[in-house]
Amino acid sequence: MQINWGFLSTLIVILLIIIAYLFFRRKEGGKELALIATMSALAALVRIPFAMLPSVQPMTFLIIMSGVVFGGRVGFFTGATAALVSNFFLGQGPWTPWQMLAWGLIGLSAGAVSRWEGMKRPLPMAVFGAVWGFLFGWITNLSHWLTFIYPLTLKTYLATYALSFKFDLAHSLTNFFLCLFLFSPCYRIMYSFRQRLYTEQLAEEETAIKKQEITKNRYS
């Protein structure tokens, strides 16, 4: 019996995404869910008009920004959800889970590297985005090779990656220049929104605690 590596690998990727969703969802609040929904919708909306330009992916830039400003958890959800939502317009297929994983990892890793203050500058983030332009392609190329290419040999593997090089390069350069020129203004805008969001959330939590204390004292 021949193993369907494309089907098996896609199932594994889906399982990994489900595990990640279950792990990260435990820490979400109502405002964070709304934030993720908003960022995902915005990222998906940005992707759709550029679908005619192969590998020009401004969505990746927004996913990077969401991870840097709001943290890796929000970045992961934004990337994975935006991929799923945008593919309802661009076409679903076995590539969708791989795209969800790749864009989710971009958001997650952006949140991780942003812990170093030195990374929160245009040039380091431009290099980060450029690297992920190729990594994204390598992840999704693997799904294409496993699912649509036969036979699965080293020759067909290398050919798949060689043929995709120009598309990966276009994605990498798009990320580089968007981060280089738009990182600072976008960071200021999004960070200001983040401050308001978490200030309001903290105030709501303090109000809830006070109400609990009043109720407790009333019946004690």
Image (cartoon, rainbow, N blue to C red):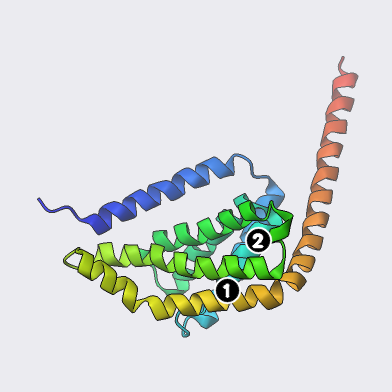
**Which residue was labeled with disc 1?**
175
| Residue 95 picture quarter | bottom left
Dot 1 amino acid type: Asn
Residue at image location 59% in from the left, 63% down from the top: 40
Quick one: SS at disc 2? helix
Total marks shown come to 2
Q: Residue at x 42, y 47 (%)?
A: 16
Rendered image quadrant of residue 93 = bottom left
Q: Position of residue 14 (x, y in %)?
A: 39, 51
**Where does residue 5 sit, x and y in percent of width and height?**
23, 55
Mark 1 and mark 2: span between their CA atoms?
14 Å
- Residue at screen point 54% across, 82% down: 49
Residue 147 against residue 111 in the figure, above or below: below
Q: Which mark is residue 66?
A: 2
> Is 94 left, or right, of 156 in this rendering?
right
Q: Position of residue 131 (x, y in %)?
A: 52, 67
Q: Nearer the viewer, residue 9 or 198?
A: 9
